[in-house]
Image (cartoon, grey):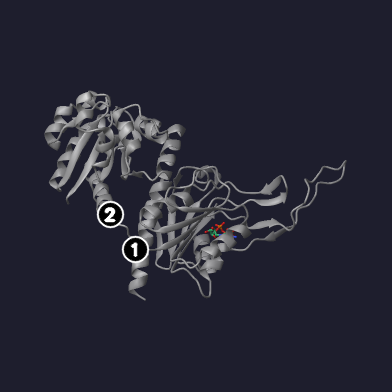
Amino acid sequence: MNKRILLIVGGGIAAYKCLELVRRARDKGIAVRCVMSEAAQQFVTPLSFASLSGDTVYTDLFSLNEESEIGHIRLSREADLIVVAPATADLMAKLANGMADSLAGAVLLATDKPVLMAPAMNPRMWAHPATRRNATQLAADGVHFVGPNSGEMAESNEAGEGRMAEPAEILAAIEGLLSGDKPLAGKRMIVTSGPTHEPIDPVRYLANRSSGKQGHAIAAAAAAAGAEVTLVSGPVSIADPAGVHVIHVETAREMLAAVEECLPADIAVCAAAVADWRPDSEGAQKMKKDGDKAAPGLTLVENPDILLTLARHHTLRPTLVVGFAAETETVIDHAKAKLARKGCDLIVANDVSHETGIMGGDRNRVHLVSSQGVESWDDMDKAAVAARLVSRISELLSTSHKSD
Ligand code: CTP
């Protein structure tokens, strides 16, 4: 493989594993040039990386020597891929916030190449809301992730999610990105995401707790896999994913209209938590309390079912229609019933009971229900669920074409 990566080594004990990564990458014919953060040099010497990479190691934004040889802009452009390993909480925060106060930060901000991060940090740091926010932002900006894994940490008595992925796993992710493998290239995909808001009057609405995180992550992963993605999103507070056409809607009826506008499509993934009902009419003015009169009653009418409309479309049914099933009990049985009722090809079922923290949270534990049976996946990051689901979708699509 005649490719070049720029490896940014962050300051963490996992930095030593990156020596093996450099060796393995070069064995595969991938040229490696290294940038080391100041903290990284406390763990491993630049000389070790220079010896293994056979190239200069860059360490300081303001080193005149280095700048006269090769500026940080060139450094960031001459590689086919930038790899950050270990991606510390600090390096993630720097890129998520666009800070260029170090060579690593400046290179990451200046690059026009894909970026792969292999996070490594203490489990509490990984779970901290600030790191979660940064990871979500980076994923939305198109950064790819490998790991972290769960297990024992270098610190004694610490275990949990935060271990850097193994060099072999990082190398596999590097090879995947360098090969330019775009399994969904040329495919049109519609993704619905988020809740819908159903107005009662100009200031009130019916809604649900959906955050849109899972649907948005699927749209981002599909775009990374080469699909031309339209994301139809209800009102959410997260950013639009990079590389995706986004249509913002409020109500179920607007969502259906936007989805129908996007047809024909090869794939539809309905991840939105569409409100099942809406008030039968929207008050023109704010409803007022009126002395001791009883509270007003709401009359609800059923909303259109977007998933069912797509899956049972007579003329423009997408080749693959995927639905979600948000359940709070007998998850698999309800999902099987939904698969049959809606007529879709695959249901991704999850338990959204309050205790699971899935609705609104960053992690998900899903069961894939299809005519082939049920497959349960471990609990993982919503971005990881999205990446795995997208590769499953491309497999299903290629087998469905073969059987055409
Ligand atoms: N869905 C949809 N339009 C609706 C309701 C649901 O497109 N009006 C889709 C969701 O996006 C999801 C699937 O249908 O992919 C299942 O949604 P869920 O809320 O789990 O089930 P419901 O169809 O609402 O059924 P129930 O309320 O009986 O659980």
Q: Label 1 sits on what residue type?
A: Glu
Residue situated in front as seen by the camera: 69 or 325: 69
**Residue at image location 30% in from the left, 32% down from the top:** 104
Viewer-side residue, 161 vs 144: 144
What separation in Å lies between label 1 and label 2 (alpha carbons)? 17 Å
Side of 167 where 233 appears, left or right: right
Q: Which residue is mark 1?
A: 395
Numbered circles on residues, count:
2
Q: Position of residue 158 (x, y in %)?
A: 33, 30
**Residue 330 in sight:** no
Vertical arrangement, residue 269 with respect to residue 242, above or below: below
Q: Position of residue 241 (x, y in %)?
A: 45, 47
**Residue 325 at least partly seen:** yes
| Quadrant in which residue 59 is drawn | top left
Q: Position of residue 250 (x, y in %)?
A: 61, 52
Q: Earlier in the sequence, mark 1 or mark 2?
A: 2
The one nearer the camera, 238 or 368, is 238
How packed is label 1: few (under 14 Cα within 10 Å), some, or many (20 or more)?
A: some
Image point 53% across, 65% down: which residue? Answer: 337
For image coordinates 14% across by 44% down, the residue present is 26
Residue where numbered disc 2 is placed: 180
**Residue mark closest to the camera, 1 vs 2:** 2
- The x, y position of residue 391, in whole percent, is 35, 57
Q: Which residue is more in the foreground, 216 or 100? A: 100
